Image: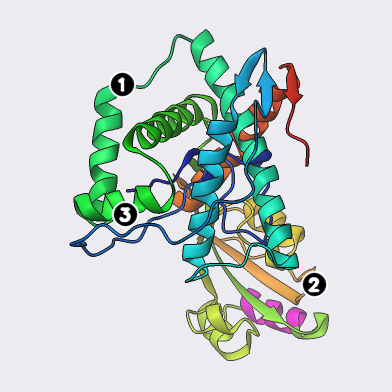
Amino acid sequence: MFLWSLTLLLLACGEASSATAVSTAGAVVKVNPIQPQATITPPSNKRTGYADGAVARVEGIEISAAEFNHALDTARVSTEEQASGALDWNSADNQKLLQNLREQILEGLINYQVVANQARKEDFAVSQADVQSRLDDFKQQVGGPIGYQNWLIRRFLNEDDQRSAITQLLLFEKMEGRHSVVDDKAEQVHARHILLQTEAEARNIFDKLRSGADFSALARQFSLDAASASKGGDLDFIFPGQTAQYGPDFERVAFALKVNEISGPIKTPLGYHIIQSLGKETRPLPFDLVQERKGEAFSIYIKTLRDNSKIEKLLKF
């Protein structure tokens, strides 16, 4: 189960500063389960970095200071929790961090608004049943009723604020599902290879293979790629882009080979490769890669929406 406040996932077109604990657009931060708590603890942290008045307009729709400040509270407190303690926001470094958070939050809120505007055009909305289900899951994840109340109090939020954030999050997720369709399968090659340091060594091994020598045995004995050498050079099925460390020529040759065909020496930044194709299949791509590509596609979609929207930034940094 995932959940954070809106602006922990709605950054400008997928860009995030390495100085913050905020995730990229369309992504979410996992919340580690918290043990149930017995008492409600008053907040000891201080609010800082607030805005007054509307912070932006998107197609005439105002983004309020209240939305911005709620998001900032959540982002700031979550940053402190990831740092395992309160931060001195008056220090020079943390002032920069706070400014970075404020900028990212503003961009995130604008991202959400352009997506929400498009959702209205598509007559698309989030059901209250889905909101309640996500809220119930989240309450359990942060330690039950008391843990949830402490979570809200520390961020200066109430349940209405959190319901609103969940509604925004679900709308964003569902619109991402609608508008970031990517292939989850691709043709892949079952390949194995032998990596040698010099062209002369590679040609010698290639001649042995043409004379009937065992590929697996030669890979175990001579290949400089220790990870695959122990498996007879076997790389298993590789998908486009997976072997980027070998350079583009490796992939080009591997995918061009007929099944059981062995290539001559292929020069790459790592040395000289001899490659054999053991088979080709259309197979599922790794889940993380598909999610990454969906995020990239949705970032492009958001940029398109932004480029076609009238956006006025009213918050001065």
Q: Earlier in the sequence, mark 2 or mark 3?
A: 3
Q: Confirm whether the magenta stretch covers residue 277.
A: no
Quadrant of the image occupied by residue 127 = top left
Per the rendering, the mark at residue 127 is 1
Q: Nearer the viewer, mark 1 or mark 3?
A: 3
* Marker disc for residue 269: 2
- Dot 1 falls on a residue whose secondary structure is loop
Q: Amino acid at mark 2?
A: Pro
In the image, residue 294 lies at what x, y percent?
A: 54, 38
Q: Amino acid at mark 1?
A: Ser
Q: Which residues are magenta?
A: 202-210
**195 left or right, relative to 131:** right
| Label 2 element class | loop
The residue positioned 69% from the left and 67% from the top of the image is 245
Q: CA distance from mark 1 to mark 2?
A: 53 Å
Q: Please give the label number shown on residue 150.
A: 3
**Above or below, 39 relative to 206:** above
Q: What is the basis of the colouring in this image?
A: rainbow
Residue drawn at x 64%, y 58% as measured from the top left: 254
Q: Secondary structure at mark 3?
A: helix
The residue that appears at 23% across and 41% down in the rendered structure is 136
For the residue pair 147 and 213, the one nearer the viewer reads as: 147
Magenta segment: does it hold 207? Answer: yes
Q: Residues within 10 Å of mark 1 (few under 14, many from 20)?
A: few
* Earlier sequence position, callout 1 versus callout 3: 1
Horizontal side of 164 relative to 75 (left or right) equals left
- Percent coordinates x, y for residue 262 in the rendering: 63, 65
Where residue 269 appears, as percent x and y from the top left, is 80, 72
Q: Is residue 169 above or below residue 307?
A: below
Q: Is residue 205 left or right of residue 47?
A: right
Nearer mark to the viewer, of 2 and 3: 3
